Image (tube, grey):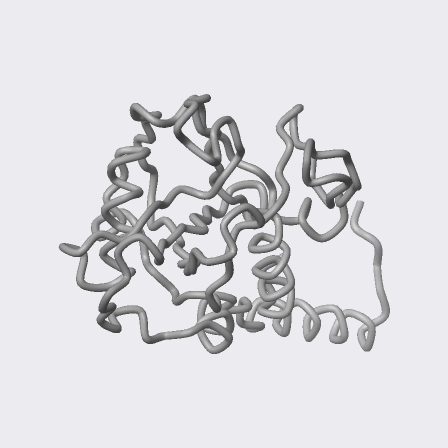
Amino acid sequence: MAPNFPKRFRCFLEAEKVTAMEMPSINWKENLKKMLNQEVDREVRDGYGSRAAVSIILREKDGLQVLLIKRKKVPSDPWSGHVALPGGMFEATDKNLKKTVVREVCEEIGVNLNLKGEILGSLDETHPLNAPGLKVTPFVVCLNGKVNIKAMDEIEKWFWVPMEFFLKKIVRVPIGKFGVQEAVIYRKQVIWGMTLRILKEISYMLRKAGAI
């Protein structure tokens, strides 16, 4: 039997119900775009060998998750065996870094970002610890539906990580010749270096945007 609330209290409950129904959801994508660089089509000249682009690919599932890859162990690859964001080196035919990241993502995991994702903008360029002369631009991408991800030739595996991990799961671990470094360990995979710096930066932005 439903409780018999006083009339004035029933009115209060109805008002609260209507307010909750009418309250708009947070448009975190639009909030995030305002914080990101929007000149994603800017032409790049003389970037061969010194510029690269990576993708922060996000999906909304049980919160917000980011796609990471683990590179195969190859002696000629300076990032052999590392956990990384999909992406790679600029090529002269790319014209701009947006084309670089679209091409590299398709080559590495078989996903066409022009069809399956929305590029929200980019972060400021950064660089890896072992290649300070390499300028890397991270692009933020939100998937617009389900995708069929494939680990191509250079990739050992791929996996999703909850973005909230990069706000509260930071530890310090020894990383070979680099000494003790900040890292996130997710299902025995160690995320550190430039990849972790990028993910920490975007996680703070996402929290400010209301996404996490």
Q: Is residue 91 left or right of residue 204?
A: left
For the N terminus, the image quarter is top right
Horizontal and vertical percent position of residue 192 = 63, 42
Which image quarter: residue 170?
A: top right
Labels in figure, total: 0
Horizontal and vertical percent position of residue 168 = 76, 49
Horizontal and vertical percent position of residue 40 = 31, 69
Residue drawn at x 64%, y 63% is 204
| Up-down relation of residue 70 to residue 124 (above or below) | above
Q: Is residue 188 left or right of residue 96?
A: right
Extreme-left residue of the structure: 93
Residue drawn at x 42%, y 65% is 122
| Up-down relation of residue 8 to residue 146 (above or below) | below
98 or 204: nearer the viewer: 98
66 or 125: nearer the viewer: 125
Residue drawn at x 69%, y 31% is 176
For the C terminus, the image quarter is bottom right
Horizontal and vertical percent position of residue 85 = 46, 43
Residue drawn at x 57%, y 67% is 21
Q: Is residue 149 left or right of residue 199?
A: left
